[in-house]
Image: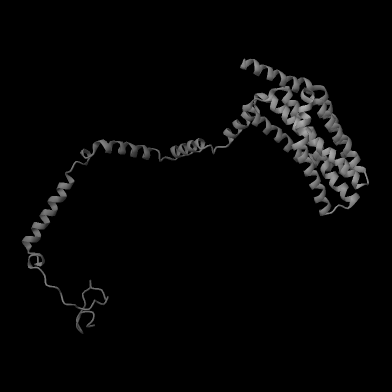
Amino acid sequence: LWRCGTRRGSRMPATQSHVPREPHTKAAPRDCATSAPKTRHGAQSEAEGITTQSATVRNIDFGSLGSRSSAPLASAGRRTRGSCSPRSRGAYASSGWEQRGGGGGGSSSAGLTGFLSLPVLKLRGAQLLMLVRLKMALAFHMFAPVWQVSIRARFDFGPRDHAQFMGLVGLTYALSQGFIAKPLVRSFGDKVSRLLLLCILVLGGARPVALYTQSVGVVYACYVPMVIALGVMNTAITTAASRLAQKEQLGGFYGVMESVENVAGMVGPALGGLLARVDGFPATLAAVVCFYAAAFVLVALFFSTHVSGAAAAEAAAAEAAKA
């Protein structure tokens, strides 16, 4: 109780808490002029001064202070308060989303439409190249699942055998692209359709032999020329496409060609597997040969007219424009 500052038996004021006080220390000397207790007259004078200052603050015209800078802020505040309605916030959000390109629907469809409306895609030669590439890719991807099952059943191919076989295929394709295809395409010149026909004959004629032979050596002997023919044909089609399309449209045309081949890569294995399930390997092989035959007929009938002829006319027009 003595530490609480009261004597035993005395009553503690109601407003005083029971928190122990700090021990008493010797107070420093105070200045009489500043620490003297305020008299009644001094307290009244101080209150009157505070009242006068508050009245002065209330009478200040804040509108006259910085009127040039406060007007835009006030108008901006009004605009901000006006745009806080749900409808305005939704409109602002939608407009910002459209400006950032996140709307997706309209802009994506417009971009796809613009991509498919390339002028080069309206040419008969470009359409012929896409159709030939589609048929060749479908034939290749339809044959792949049947070939994997057949080579395992005939020769008991394991992981090591598959690695060796695919290594030989990759090496042959790289050599055909780097050292064989370009000289052949250059040597045939405007009669590149004959080179394409020869490649289609090799691809369509060697696959049945490779599928039914009982010799691994014959399989390798068939696949080496097939891979070379595939590389040469891809190079010839790419060269023809570069002659048809202008420079600013060439990238888009290549993209469409790759898309066509990717679609064939998704559909071809399923078709080959379904045909093999219905009637075994002969049904799939017959469909593959039919696709190669259709590509052969297209190249034989229309390539020289719509691809080589159109490329020659385009080159002549470019030379005339330069002259």
* Residue 279 appears in the figure: no
Residue 32 lies in quadrant: bottom left
Residue 227 lies in quadrant: top right
The residue at 11%/54% (across/down) is 49
Q: Is residue 43 left or right of residue 105?
A: left
Q: Is residue 87 left or right of residue 11?
A: right
Q: Which residue, as the protein is rendered here, is positioned at the far bottom?
A: 8
Name the one closer to the observer, 200 or 116.
Answer: 200
Residue 39 lies in quadrant: bottom left
* Quadrant of image for the N terminus: bottom left
x and y percentages locating residue 247 in the rendered image = 63, 27
* Quadrant of image for the C terminus: top right
x and y percentages locating residue 131 in the rendered image = 76, 29
Q: Is residue 193 above or below residue 319?
A: below
Q: Which coloring applies here?
A: one colour
The residue at 60%/32% (across/down) is 111
x and y percentages locating residue 195 in the rendered image = 81, 28
Name the one closer to the observer, 99 or 263.
Answer: 263
Q: Which residue, as the protein is rendered here, is positioned at the far right?
A: 214
Q: Which residue, as the protein is rendered here, is positioned at the far left?
A: 41
Q: Is residue 278 above or below residue 159?
A: above
Q: How many marks?
A: 0
Q: Is residue 312 above or below residue 253?
A: above
* Residue 205 appears in the figure: yes
Q: Is residue 239 left or right of residue 145?
A: left
x and y percentages locating residue 45 in the rendered image = 8, 57
Name the one closer to the observer, 168 or 34.
Answer: 168
